[in-house]
Image (cartoon, rainbow, N blue to C red):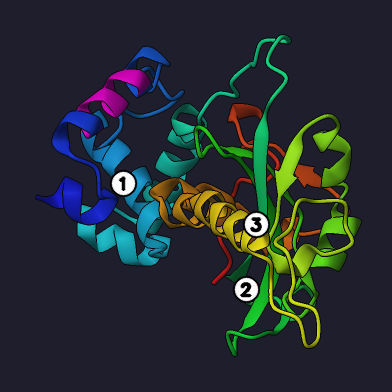
Amino acid sequence: MWVETFTELRMRQFERLLTVVRERGGNGPGGGRPWCLPLADRVLLVAAYYRTNLTMRQLAPLFGVSPATICRVIQRLRPLLAIEQAVRPDEVVERLWIVDGTLIPVRDRKVGASSRNYRFSANAQVIIDADTKLVIAAARPVPGNTADAKAWRDSGLAQQCQGVTVLGDGAYINTGLVVPHRKRPGRALLPGEEKDNAEHRKVRARVEHAFARPSRRAIDLPLRLAGHLGQGDTVIPGPEACGPLAGPRRR
């Protein structure tokens, strides 16, 4: 019950995740005293941290440990839970990626700005693969009141999309991305344009599904850390991306 409540994973999925972490050395010695929690509880702890966005102080009483222990467990197991980057074969030419901006609430007023969700937020541009819904890249955030088109141009992500078709919504007009047809003043869309827009919406909705998945927290939470936020850098999800963005969130 706790597994599905905190992670939205079925027990069979959680058991597979636990097996992967164990194979990657998650149950090995940590270079000190033995862990006070079994491996299953530690994996559940990290998954709940990313899925629920609870602070370490809030998670501590749930697992009966101190906030410092929560921090050590997360720093130890976080790289082991990261998805390894998939290597696509060179012969795959017809790739389809989707880009969208997501507003992440932040406490740092130097990075966030009052945006359309009426909160101080940062705008992070995220690219996903349309087939797998896995994150390809995520840019360092900009203030939340920044338009998606400007955030995209300043992110540097376009350099990673050479030779790839990238879909975007109407906010990315004049950026070189594939966007929906727009109505002209006094003229309705042609039937073919309406059909194109319907297909475009159907495919582009996958990026919203990716944002709603638990793995989205792996993007959101590191980007919330005020000490590591900057502009113009690109974050590639994977084990190697967990290091510089890791650390306890500020309270």
Viewed as shown, does residue 198 lie left or right of 30? Answer: right
Q: Nearer the viewer, mark 2 or mark 1?
A: 2
- Above or below: residue 100 compared with residue 234: below
Residue at the disc numbered 3? 192
Task: Give the mark nearest the N terminus, 1 or 3.
Answer: 1
Above or below for 190 versus 73: below
2 vs 3, front mark: 3
User: Is residue 17 magenta-colored?
Assistant: yes
At label 1, which amino acid type do we have? Leu
Q: Is residue 3 left or right of residue 249?
A: left
Q: CA distance from mark 2 to mark 3?
A: 42 Å
Q: Please state the extent of the stretch shown in magenta in the rendering.
A: 14-20
**Residue 102 screen position, x and y as percent:** 62, 64
Q: Which residue is mark 2?
A: 106
Residue shown at 64% from the left, 16% from the top: 88
Which marked residue is nearer to the observer: mark 1 or mark 3? Answer: 3
Question: How many numbered marks appear?
Answer: 3
Q: Residue at x 37, y 44 (%)?
A: 46
Q: Residue 144, percent across and down?
A: 72, 76
Q: Could one spot residue 91 in this view of the protein?
A: yes
Say which amino acid is labelled 2.
Val
Vertical placement of residue 135 versus 95, above or below: below
The residue at 41%/51% (across/down) is 213
Q: Earlier in the sequence, mark 2 or mark 1?
A: 1
Indicate which disc residue 45 carries: 1
